[in-house]
Amino acid sequence: MRIESFEFCDHDTGWRLKEARFDGLNLLVGLSGAGKSKVLRALDDVRRLGLGEDVEAGRWSWALACRHGGRRFGWSGVLGRVDGSRSFLVERLIVDDALVIERADGRIRFRDQKTPRLNHRESILTLFADEEEPELIRSGLALCFDVDRETSGPVLVPDTLDELFDEGQAFEGSAEQWRHRPPPHAPDLKSPLALGLLMLRRKLPEVYAQLVDSYRDVFHTVEDIAVETVRMPSGNVLEIRLKERGADGWIAHRDISRGMLRTLAALRALLILPAGSLLTIDEFENSLGVNCLPAVTRLIDSRADCQFILTSHHPYVIDHIPIDAWKLVRRRGSRVELLPARDLPALVGESQLDAFTRLINTPEYEDGID
């Protein structure tokens, strides 16, 4: 899934994102409160709507343009409330410049043919999920991930862990090989971190070994990573444990810092993201120490087969992400727009850090909230 443009309006609050265009690598920068995180949340909310997930939605409208599977998609809609419940009032799905599905005035036309009245609480993408084009864009939406979406705490599991796994054979190959032909029943990036690591160790042992090596490169005192079941009053709990050099025992899950867990989640995602995925990371540097940022940034650089939308203020991130990838987030009241930094004359010909210094002194940045 490669997002080309996105616009969104929350008609209840008046918050509006002007049509924003995205490249393969995107770093959202701007004043705190300008709307960087809200752009990511709006994008994720629309993704969840398309997949039929539960979303606390208000009166929204959106337009999403993307590419997936060699096709170009345009999906737009207006969401409201009818009799107190969420209702899709207007929707359009355009594929390769041809109108495939249109919803208006309570009726839906599919390939220019009227359909019986269908559930207004469901998107056309879920109502026609068995058709080729809706199924294809939904498969693309399913390839959109967020590092912080997964649960990093311990997770309750059945008494027999084998109940969680299918009988398929483990994939004997590197992360690079797996990304371009992931096997069925692959480790789910949206599963809790502890469970995801256990699945990775069982299903992709070579990739799991790569993950442990990458983690040790960041945290030099860590010797090994384990995922174990611990019997608790509430039931069996799956926990992550770390073995550090010189320590007598293993570090328990509850004693692992948030930064160490977030780094583990980020490395795992970057290693096994299927080609064509989108990964969003809000406040890239949050909970990541200086020693973590280089490893995660290098992995992002190596994944040109994926799309990234990041937010950050950290000098290391700024210095290692090309100026062409910067998008300045500027807000005027409730209206938000993304300005490509390459379009700002003051930044032309500057080094990364010099350019950022100039950026934060430009009128576009200083007047980022008005």
Image (tube, helix red, strand yellow):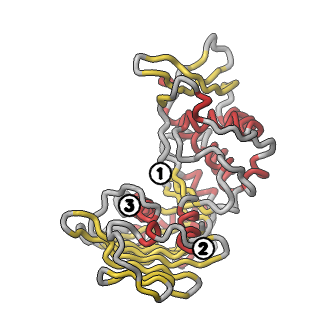
List the residue tagged with mark 3. 38
Give the spatial CA distance, label 3 vs label 2: 23 Å
Distance between mark 1 and mark 3 Cα atoms: 12 Å
Tag nearer the camera, 1 or 2: 2
Which badge, 3 or 2, comes first in the chain's sequence?
3
Return the residue nearer the eye: 134 or 69.
Answer: 134
Q: Residue furthest front?
A: 116
**Residue shown at the point (77%, 38%) measured from the top left:** 206
Quarter holding the C terminus? bottom left
Mark 2, residue position = 67
Q: Quadrant of residue 207?
A: top right
Return the x and y of residue 131 as percentages of the image width and height: 55, 72
Q: Residue at x 68, y 25 (%)?
A: 224
Which residue is found at the position 65% from the left and 21% from the top? Answer: 244
Residue 43 can be seen, yes or no: yes
Mark with earlier residue (1, 3) = 3
Q: Which residue is mark 1?
A: 283
Q: 240 and 222: which one is in front? A: 240
Q: Position of residue 155 (x, y in %)?
A: 48, 31
What label sits on residue 169 in the rendered view?
Answer: none
